[in-house]
Amino acid sequence: MEFETALKSASLTERNVFAARQLLSGRGGGPSAYLAFAGPALIASIAYMDPGNFATNIQAGAKYGYGLLWVVALANLIAMLFQALSAKLGIATGHNLAELCRAHFPRPIVWIMWVVSEIAAMATDLAEFLGGAIGLSLLFHMPLIAGMGVTAIISYGILMFEDRGFRPIELIIGGLVALIGLCYLAEMFIAPVDWAKAGFHTFVPQLADDGALFIAVGIVGATIMPHALYLHSGLTQGRTPVRNESERRQVIRFSNREVIIALSFAGLVNMAMVIMAASAFHAGYSDVAEIETAYHTLTPLLGAGASGIFLISLIASGVSSSTVGTMAGQMIMQGFIGFRIPTWARRLITMLPAFALVAWGVNATQALVMSQVVLSIALPIPMFALLLLTRRADVMGAFANRPMTQIVAAVCAGAVLLLNVVLISQTFGITIPR
C-alpha cells in the first residue's frame, strides 16, 4: 500500500523509469509498458521536420512535382541508420557522442570539433527560431520581430520543463510532432494528389535535369542533422538503468524499433510536404521557393484552410525544433568541454544573431538556406566520429558494429559527404568537373 502511494506521488519521469525497469525485469508487459522506452527518437525526429525541410521540400515539389520523392525516402533510410547508431552508442557506453570524442580523440581535434559543432548547433537553432517566427508573423499578421519574440518565449517555456526530468519534455515535443503530422494529413485531403504518380516516384529514381540533381543534393545534404546525432546519444545514455548485458541488449532493441517508427513518421511528413507542393504548385507555380510565397499562393489555390494549416505546422515545427536545438547545444558544450551555461543564456546566444539578421534586412528564407550550408559543412564530423567509435570494441564492448553494418554506414557517410561537397560548391558558385 505504501509502495502504491509512493508511486502515485512520483514524478512522470520516475514512473516512466519504474515501468521500464518492470518490463526489463520480466514483471511488466502490455503495449503501455513499451511506451516507457519511447521518447529519445521522437525528440531527435523533430530535426527532420524543421523549417529548413519546409523550404527544401516546397522547392522540390513545386519545381519537379513528385519526381524527387524517392530522394526523401532514401535520405530518411540513411538517417534511420545513423540515429540508431547514435542511440546505441549512448545505451552501450553510458556516455554521449561529444563526451566520447573528448575521451578518445586528440585534444586539438576535440577543440576543432567543438567549435564547428557549436557553430552548427547555433545555425540550426537560428534557422528553426526564424521558421517559427515566420509562421507566427504570417498567421497573426504581426511584424517578424514580434513573431521572433513570441517564439523565444514559447521555446524557453518548454525548456523549463527539463528541470522535471526527461518525460515531460518528451511528451510536449511528442504532442507538437503529432500536431505537425495531423496538419499534413489534413493537407493530403485538401490537395488534389495524384496518388499513382506519388507512389511511382517514391520507388523509381529519376532526375529530370541538373536542377533536379542539385535539389536532390539539398534534400540529402540537409536531412541528417549534426545536432541530432549528438543529441540522440545523450538522450539515451542514462535514461533507462540496466543491470546486465542482456538488459542493455533489450533496451537497444527497443531503441531500434522506436527509431524506425519515429523516423518513418518524419519521413512521411517530409514526403507529404513534397506531395502538397507538387499538387498545389507544380502545374502553374513551379517557381515557388520561399515559405512566404508558398503561404500566399496556397490561399487562392486551396483556400484559407490549407494555408492556415500550413502555418500551424510551420509554427509547431519552429517552436519544437528550436527547443530541441537548444538542448543539443547544451549537450555539445557540456560533452566537449565539460561546461554548461544557464538555459536563458543559451537561448539568448541563439536569439541575438537572428534578431541582428532581421534588423539588418536579411531575407528570412535566405537565412534558412544558408543555415543548411553551414550544417552541410559540419555534418561529416559527427558522422565519421560515430563510425569510428561504434566500430571499436574497447568503446562499445559486445555492441560494436558488425562488419556489414560498418560497411553500409561508411558507404552512406561517404555518399552524404560527396553530396554535401556538391551542395557547398553550388552555393558558392564553384564548378565541379564531370
Image (cartoon, helix red, strand yellow):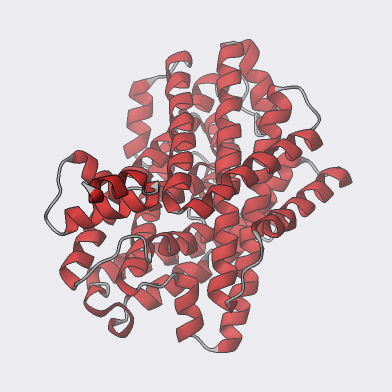
- The total of numbered circles placed on residues is 0
Depth check: give the residue in front, 270 or 347.
Answer: 347
Q: Position of residue 353 (x, y in %)?
A: 78, 54
Q: Is residue 265 left or right of residue 426?
A: left
Q: Is residue 67 left or right of residue 126?
A: left
Depth check: give the residue in front, 31 or 336.
Answer: 31
Residue occupying image coordinates x 15% and y 68%: 246
Q: Is residue 368 left or right of residue 229?
A: right
In the image, residue 433 above or below residue 401: above
Residue 421 visible, this orientation? no
Residue furthest front as drawn: 2
Quarter of the rendering occupied by the C terminus: bottom right
Residue occupying image coordinates x 48% and y 55%: 224
Depth check: give the residue in front, 115 or 271.
Answer: 115
Residue occupying image coordinates x 50% and y 41%: 49
Q: Position of residue 85 (x, y in %)?
A: 34, 64
Q: Position of residue 329 (x, y in %)?
A: 59, 61
